[in-house]
Image (spheres, rainbow, N blue to C red):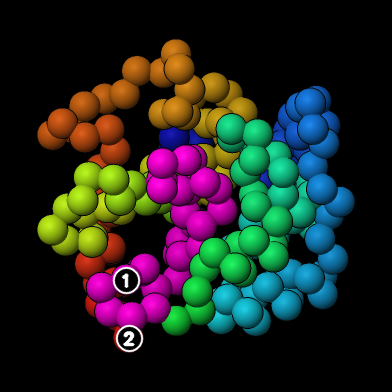
Amino acid sequence: MDGMPIDEDELIARVRRRAAADATPPAAPATAEEVVAAEAALGLALPPLLVRLYREVGDGGYGPDGHLLWPLRRIVAANPRRTAPGGRPVGVVSVLDWGCAMSAVVDCLRPDAPVLLHEPNAEPQDPADTWFEDRPSLARWLADWLDGRAWWEEHVMMDERDGEMLPRWPDAAARIAAP
């Protein structure tokens, strides 16, 4: 099922319905100007599906754990434009705080916008070891959330891969070292 194409129009409609059904409605949609300003502040283009979510569903306040998609202003504040070597990988933006310093992060440099899990709690020697591949695309991540198939759902059993819930993100070291 992971290889099946996802109709983004239907996905947006499903997210909108789910957000409307939740106890707290999402914020009003972002304007085109707000998206452009956020991208300028971040120094990178947000993936088209992420932009559609902000423009067509709302400027945050919905999604997994009831708060996917931080408002654009929070994304800009939480994602420094420039990072020092050994810091945050280049080209990623955090969109959700799982708590305990863990976050969901979208890779804005890849066409499918993979979703990563940043889990710094293990205190590894190498910062690259705190980055994991959650889903190969933002669309798949949203579809799995809507279908109850995501790793954070209580009833989903994780495949253990070398003792880890998710595979390590292979681009982490190169992106952290990038100037």
Which region is colored magenta? 83-112
Q: Which residue is mark 1?
A: 87
Residue at 26% of width from left, 25% of height from top? 159
Q: Is residue 66 visible in this depiction of the protein?
A: yes
Residue at 28% of width from left, 63% of height from top? 171
Please state the horizontal and vertical placement of residue 78, each as a whole percent of the image: 54, 64
Please state the horizontal and vertical placement of residue 143, each as a whole percent of the image: 58, 34
Q: Is residue 13 visible in this depiction of the protein?
A: no
Residue 127 vs residue 105: left or right?
A: left
Disc 2 residue type? Pro
Please state the horizontal and vertical placement of residue 164, each as a whole percent of the image: 21, 35
User: In the orientation shown, which residue stands out farthest toward the top?
Assistant: 155
Q: In this picture, is 138 found above or below 109?
A: above
Q: Tag 1, which secondary structure?
A: loop
Circle 2 or circle 1, nearest the eye: 1
Q: Which quarter of the figure has residue 158?
A: top left
Q: Quadrant of the C terminus?
A: bottom left
Residue at 72% of width from left, 49% of height from top? 60
The residue lying toward the viewer, choosing from 84 and 3, is: 84
Residue 84 vs residue 146: left or right?
A: left
Residue 116 vs residue 58: left or right?
A: left
The magenta stretch spans residue 141: no
The magenta stretch spans residue 93: yes
Please state the horizontal and vertical placement of residue 98, each as a whole percent of the image: 48, 40
Calculate the distance from the C-alpha at mark 2 to the C-alpha at mark 1. 11 Å
Disc 1 residue type? Gly
Residue at 46% of width from left, 61% of height from top? 107
Q: How many marks?
A: 2
Q: Which residue is mark 2?
A: 179
The residue lying toward the viewer, choosing from 2 and 116, is: 116
Q: Which quarter of the figure has residue 45?
A: bottom right
Q: Tag 2, which secondary structure?
A: loop
